[in-house]
Image (cartoon, grey):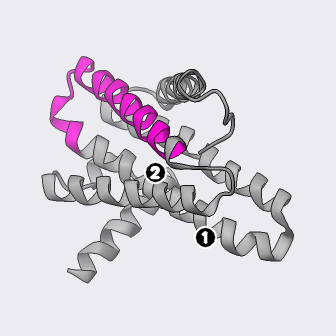
Amino acid sequence: MICNVITLIVTLFDIIRLRKGPEAIPHSPVLFVFTVAAWLVAGAMITALIDGLDQTDFLVSIVTGVIALLIYAAVVVLSRRSSRLLQTITAILGCGALLQFTFAAGHVFLTMIIGKNLAALINYLILLWSVPVEGHIIARASNRHWTIGLLIAAAVFLIQIQLGLAINPVDTLAP
């Protein structure tokens, strides 16, 4: 069991480094549930760690995340690659969770070492990396060129920002 979890984490890091695609993730509803739980825990952890974030911010991030997943699901289905849907969504959630855990660790440790402002910049760059990662995943899942995937992910990212601001206009940079 532990060996399988380590293999999954290594695979997700390979996807984050754009070396593998969602096809490297097993087609498993149990794994999907596990990654949803990890994604929620990581989001809750960030909410608890960052001053000024609260339950509303957490709920907004869940809503915008689910809408992004629905858009990505539509892209995969419209590309006639429905058989890849579970692996694609699992990969997006798993990579998102790992990036959020990295953000949380960076927040705790980098803040102590280099200060709050520089640590915040580095951490937001970590989260921003999710755009090319999601673009890579979508490009591989839909059998499109990586630039198409990147454009789709950038559009989804902008939709998430606009939707987040419409729902909760107070916090403009909440993860």
Give the residue type at disc 2. Gly
**Residue 124 percent across, percent down from the top left:** 69, 49
Residue 17 drawn above or below residue 157: below
Q: Is residue 139 visible?
A: no
Write down the residue under mark 1.
105
User: Which residue matches tag 2?
Assistant: 96
Give the spatial CA distance, label 1 vs label 2.
Answer: 14 Å
Which tag, 1 or 2, sits closer to the chain's start? 2
* Front-lying residue, 138 or 2: 2
Mark 1 against mark 2, which lies toward the viewer? 1
Depth order, front residue of 107/77: 107
The answer to whether 157 is drawn above or below residue 121 in the figure is above
Q: Residue at x 29, y 29 (%)?
A: 73
Describe residue 6's horizontal placement relative to residue 165 as left or right: left
Q: Residues within 10 Å of mark 1 (few under 14, many from 20)?
A: some
Query: Who is closer to the viewer here, 119 or 94?
Result: 119
How many numbered marks, from 0 up?
A: 2
Q: Bounds of the magenta span?
A: 57-86
Measured as percent of width and height from the top left, residue 117 is found at 84, 57
x%, y% of residue 156?
A: 49, 26
Instruction: Tell whether position 80 is magenta.
Output: yes
- Quadrant of residue 112 in the image? bottom right
Residue visible at 66% across and 67% down in the picture: 106
In the rendered structure, are the residues bearing label 1 and label 2 in contact, judged by CB atoms less than 8 Å apart? no
Left or right, 60 with respect to 170, comes to left
